[in-house]
Image (tube, rainbow, N blue to C red):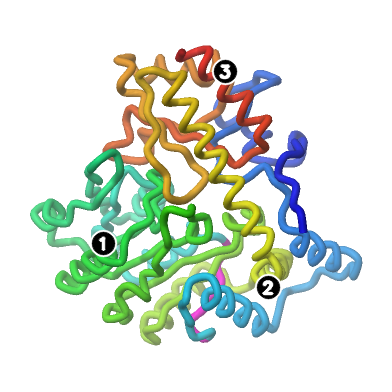
Amino acid sequence: MAFDFDTVIDRRGTHSVKWDGMGGRLGLSAEDQIPMWVADMDFAAPPSVNEAIRGLVEHGVHGYYGDDSTMRAAVAGWMATRHGWEPDPDWMSWVHGLVAGIGFSIQAFTEPGEGVVVFSPVYHMFGNTVRAAGRTLIESELKQVQGRYEMDLDQLAADLPDNARMVLFCSPHNPGGRVWTADEITALANFCAERDLIFLSDEIHHDLVYSSAKHIVTYKAAPHIADRLVTLAAPTKTFNIAGSLTGVVLISNPEMRKKFADAKAACGSGASNRFGMVAAEAAYRDGAEWLDALVPYLQANRDHLDKAVAEHMPGVRSMPLEATYLAWLDFSGLGKDMAEVTEMVEHQARIAVNKGGPFGQGGDGWLRFNFACPRATLDEAIGRLAEVFG
């Protein structure tokens, strides 16, 4: 089956944060502003997803969702087929998005004031959620080795405070696009075991991996620390159904699973989103062919953007991405203040992006660009950037 990723779909006026939120959230109001900030794609979801939602609408009764056995089987089947991992369906718990899953985990496995380690720069909601929960954010800055990020566990060991209780790991990494090796994951797992730290592995981008790399599920790389491991996954990034706010948390340790369930119950978060669960199950069962077409398209967009940066934007460099559709561009070589650079991108090129500072230590000087859009949209953005920075 052929899938169309080239047609430009008008998303304005659809309650889209990415498109309709630029004015209120970013203060950007140009009619031709290109949104390359929020991490969702400008492509239609897989046909199986839209057919499943259409079936719900045609049925017409939208009551509470129940009997999740087929959804559990779908997740287990996807993990086995795509990632060579066979989790027990009983390990699964549903959450309204993985940020919620992180929040529940922090509440379940740490106490106020205790420390949560993140490897920065990293997805800004990690730090926001840790701080909002009244925990201490511990940033371990990633080091750059041959242009890509690596963890510095020796430095973390030297700096780790006594109140550290959890490590929040982004795998694959957002915004750096790293796909961690089995050795890297195992080293971090051993670090957690030696220091009695909970290992929270957010693997939401695990299906959006390019041909040069292979995602390794943390549980598979380090089964010996399963008793302290929490794995978070979701179909939302993979199949562009982020608005469904549907994710799965997998915990093999029954005591930890009970603590997690209690934290959810304390927040009144028991029921699942009916539309989200049905869409997710349809995606996991029948979305593989669509995904197999999507990833090469994204890889071509990545390469197209990288080539343009290298050839037409002197002083700017892109970090090589092994996964995600989020380009991480370094503007520090321009010798300009980042406020000026951001103004050039947002107001001269008229492109909405994510600023690097909120991603934590090491983020200053960088901007994040979402290239999950039709090639025509990307070409327009590249042309504007080349005109401003060329």
- Residue 376 vs residue 173, the one in the foreground: 376
Q: Is residue 321 placed above or below 169 in the rendered structure?
A: above
Query: Which one is earlier in the sequence, the residue at label 1 or at label 3?
Result: 1
State the CA–CA distance, disc 2 to disc 1.
31 Å
Q: Where residue 332 sits in the image (x, y, percent)?
A: 31, 23
Q: Is residue 261 placed above or below 166 in the rendered structure?
A: below
Q: Indicate the quadrant where residue 121 lies.
A: top left
State the CA–CA distance, disc 1 to disc 3.
39 Å
Q: Where residue 46 sits in the image (x, y, percent)?
A: 72, 58
Q: Indicate the quadrant where residue 172 lies.
A: bottom left
Q: Is residue 132 placed above or below 289 in the rendered structure?
A: above
**Residue at mark 3:** 384
**Residue at mark 2:** 285
Q: Which mark is residue 184?
A: 1
Q: Where residue 98 sits in the image (x, y, percent)?
A: 50, 60
Residue occupying image coordinates x 15% and y 72%: 194
How many numbered discs, if any?
A: 3
What amino acid type should be assigned to the residue bearing mark 2?
Arg
Q: Is residue 346 left or right of residue 67?
A: left
User: What is the magenta range?
Assistant: 90-96
State the CA–CA distance, disc 2 to disc 3.
40 Å
| Mark 3 crowd level (few <14, some 14–19, many ≥20, 10 Å Cα) | some
- Residue 249 vs residue 315, the one in the foreground: 315
What amino acid type should be assigned to the residue bearing mark 3?
Arg
Residue occupying image coordinates x 91% and y 66%: 58
Q: Is residue 60 left or right of residue 205?
A: right
**Magenta residue check for 86:** no
Which residue in the rendered view is the most extreme toward the left? 158
| Mark 2 crowd level (few <14, some 14–19, many ≥20, 10 Å Cα) | some
